[in-house]
Amino acid sequence: MKTWTKAICGLAACSVLALGLDTTGRALAAESRIAAAGEVRVYAELVPLRQLAEAIGAAVVWNQETYGVTVTRGNESFRVAIGAAEAQTGNKTVALPRAAELVEETTMVPLSLVRDALHADVSWTAGGGLIIGKEDTISLGGYVVHLLQTGRYEEAGALMSEPLRRALPVPLLQQVWGQLTQAFGAPGQLMTAAEERSSVHRNAVLVYKTDKPVPLELTMRFRGGKLDDLYLPASAAGGYQTPAYDRPEGYTEKEIMVGKGDFALPGTLTLPRGDGPFPAVVLVHGSGPNDRDESIGGYKPFRDLAVGLADKGIAVLRYEKRTREHPFKSSLLPDFSVREETIDDALLAVQALQEEKAVRADRIFVLGHSQGGMLVPRILEQDTPHAIAGSILLAAPSGPLEDLLLWQLQQAVERAKAAGQPAVVVGALEAQAAQWKAMHALLKDPGNSISNLPKEFAVSNPYWWFDFRNYEGAKLAARQRGPMLLLQGENDSQVPAEELNKWKQALGTRTDVTYRSFPKLNHFFVPAEQPSTGEEYAKPGNVPGTVIDAIAGWIAERR
């Protein structure tokens, strides 16, 4: 089912901002901006500690007994007392160039203390303005949250990248931030902060305590010093374990970019060691904002496929899905469809492989899982240069997604009843099934369309659904030609094993299709001893070598 995450605002180079409160709560006028490239900074010797630290995401606690202050940001902290020319950072005592002072109830400390203890690329001008280095993504991310939490939406909105600003104007930004904090809790203390880099974005991963039981994790994506998008993970990782066939000495990996411009995607190209060029596979995700590994709970099936196939002499390209890397910029488009979500990027990934010297351009295959698999016929249809040598479909629905979703919800009700779940649980599942049944009827009504969307359709992205309704990948594939491999797990609670027979019936006249069915494998092609319910996804598991062998063997035959 189509999902998308919420997002917030960002920062732009050389923009003027107002900043902060002092320890008494009085507003302090201050010019704040992002450092310009090559700028020589001139700054004051002492800076207002609370104003500066809180602006970049740190928590500041005053101790009246010791007349000192403790500052914490993620795993970094320091303590300093008024009148002291030294501070405690971790287990170390560091000398300060000048003692901390209390000026009009404001704690003033040397700027070097904040820079060194918090590893923050910040400056404070003699005129009282904060400057943040454009590559200090953690400080930039903390500052964005600070702006939003203090209600300065106009300032924050003015600091977004142009594509994000188009998708998220200030009134919507304010609405979304309010909804986000209501649902997940208002950000409090910053528990952890880390930077992650890709070929497209510099990401600040910030985890905040809130008034809710679960911390709030925000991944803030910066590009060129501007906040370009924001991602909230739907669930926590579940302790992935590498498979036995993962031999790092047998492959190399490099970061590449899929596509260009506003929606460029970071990806990983896994290459076998040795002399190429090699056949290659593009991995196409299922529904939802998937990462390049298609991570869910304790599984990373796309990573398993990449290292497993590389061990068999096959290169693999996997990449972040558009709704993961650009959740706001994509999902807030009024006419966002599966073409933008999946099809276009899969074809761009094929193009990226064609440019790699280590890849055989005439032996590039596309592998789609679940919704990605059902879209493979659409991808082939759009492959006008005929660059795709063959296709592989894993757990691919043969018919309309809206029909499958209704089946899934009805099956969830039956499983709950069979397991003796409490009436309140069964009732909630029945309500969900009934709600989708009503939406399903609207989707099947020929009077409704993308140009006549029904107001009663109470699901996000109605255009996406009405553009995709009644799509039957098997019928489209019946009119196509080219090597195709269909794999299905027999213990799949999301796409039933019977779907493979439907593909066989639809493709009955084709002689270039191979079918394989695997006992005990669930929707992500991981073994499950008990009937799959999806709950087992939380436990670590891997795609077995038999699946790797089936794919690699089939590719080897397509010479």
Image (cartoon, rainbow, N blue to C red):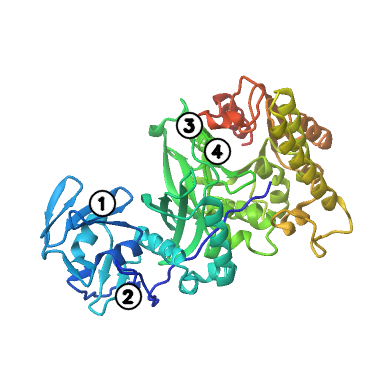
In the rendered image, residue 163, in percent from the top left (x then y), is placed at: 55, 68
Q: Which mark is residue 28?
A: 2
Q: Nearer the viewer, mark 2 or mark 3?
A: 2
Label 2 to label 3: alpha-carbon separation: 60 Å
The reply to whether the C-beta atoms of the residues labelled 2 and 3 are less than 8 Å apart is: no
Q: What is the secondary structure assignment of the residue under circle 2?
A: loop
Please tell me how crowded label 2 is: few (under 14), some (14-19), or many (20+) other residues with Cα within 10 Å.
some
Q: Nearer the viewer, mark 3 or mark 4?
A: 4
Look at label 2 and name its amino acid.
Answer: Leu
Q: Earlier in the sequence, mark 3 or mark 4?
A: 4
In the rendered image, residue 404, in percent from the top left (x then y), is placed at: 76, 40
Q: Earlier in the sequence, mark 2 or mark 4?
A: 2
Q: Nearer the viewer, mark 1 or mark 4?
A: 1
- Specify whether residue 82 is in view: yes
Q: Is residue 345 shown above or below 358?
A: below
Look at label 4 and name its amino acid.
Answer: Ile
